[in-house]
Image (cartoon, rainbow, N blue to C red):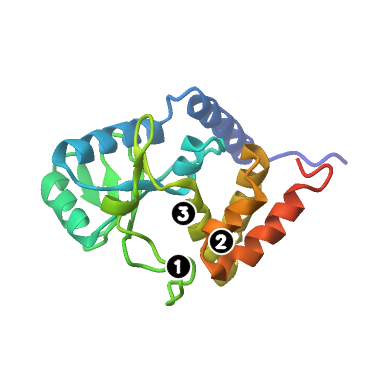
Amino acid sequence: MVEVLPADREQAFWSGVQYAKRFFIGEADVQRALERLARLLDERGIPYALIGAMALNEWGYRRVTVALDILLAPEGLNALKTEVLGRGYIETFPGSRGLRDTETGVNIDVVLAGEYPGDGKPKPVRFPDPGQAAVRGRRVALLPLPKLVELKLASGISAPHRLKDLADVLELIRLLALPRELAESLDASVRAKYDELWQAAQTAGAE
């Protein structure tokens, strides 16, 4: 007997397909939310860096996402909240650092400079001050690719629930043909893992 996919699961699948279609042509809610937030941050002179899946897209790794991840300094977060709360943005929950764009419904997850990636415990790698570390992309400010790779490696190494970060690095190496020598620009604590992933990316059929 052929098992029938429940109607709600089938509907969820096709909704996902439609969302991915809008995302890849640049018309998804998360992209509208990013354009709006980046414009606001630039106009207010608040240093920031786009991180997370949308940053991967900016660097050439196309991956669908429904949320924004933004790196701010603590004073930048305070300035942002002063400017926008009640005016198109609300806190994800009372007292949270995260925000929600009320126009699009997109959640904005905020990471603060000085925090540690992955398990949050002290380690040689931490999130930098976006005012000093960010570079300007075509549309937004984001971290240099080596710094993004370094943070993802530190996250995936320290936190079992963040293994996707290691997979992201593997895909970046493969898709962008990142050189083995990039390891030399990374913190010593993550170089061995980068080299391991680089070698894995060279395996025939890795794609």
Disc sitting over residue 67 in the figure: none
In this view, the mark in front (3 or 2)? 3
Instruction: Judge left or right: residue 34 versus residue 162.
Output: left
In the image, residue 75 above or below residue 86: below
Which residue is at a point 43% across and 29% down the rendered structure image?
28
Q: Which residue is mark 3?
A: 147
Q: Which residue is mark 2?
A: 153
Q: Quick one: 123 or 86, which is closer to the camera?
A: 123
Quadrant (top left/top right/bottom left/bottom right) for the N terminus: top right
Could you say whether the residue bearing mark 1 is in a helix, strand or loop? loop
Q: Which residue is mark 1?
A: 125
Which residue is at a point 53% across and 38% down the rendered structure image?
64
Q: Earlier in the sequence, mark 2 or mark 1?
A: 1
**Measured Cα–Cα span from mark 3 to mark 2:** 10 Å
**Measured Cα–Cα span from mark 2 to mark 1:** 9 Å
Question: What is the three-letter code of the residue carrying label 2?
Answer: Leu
Q: Earlier in the sequence, mark 3 or mark 2?
A: 3
Quadrant (top left/top right/bottom left/bottom right) for the C terminus: top right
In the image, residue 39 above or below residue 128: above
Query: Badge 3: how crowded within 10 Å, few (<14), some, or many (20+)?
Result: many
Residue 32 at what x, y percent from top left?
34, 30
**Toward which corner of the image does residue 27 lie, by quadrant?**
top left
Q: Earlier in the sequence, mark 1 or mark 3?
A: 1
Does any portion of residue 94 appear in the rendered image? Answer: no
Residue 116 at what x, y percent from top left?
41, 69
Question: CB atoms at circles 2 and 1 under 8 Å apart?
Answer: yes
Could you say whether the residue bearing mark 2 is in a helix, strand or loop? helix
Question: What is the three-letter code of the residue carrying label 1?
Answer: Val
Residue 72 at what x, y percent from top left?
28, 54
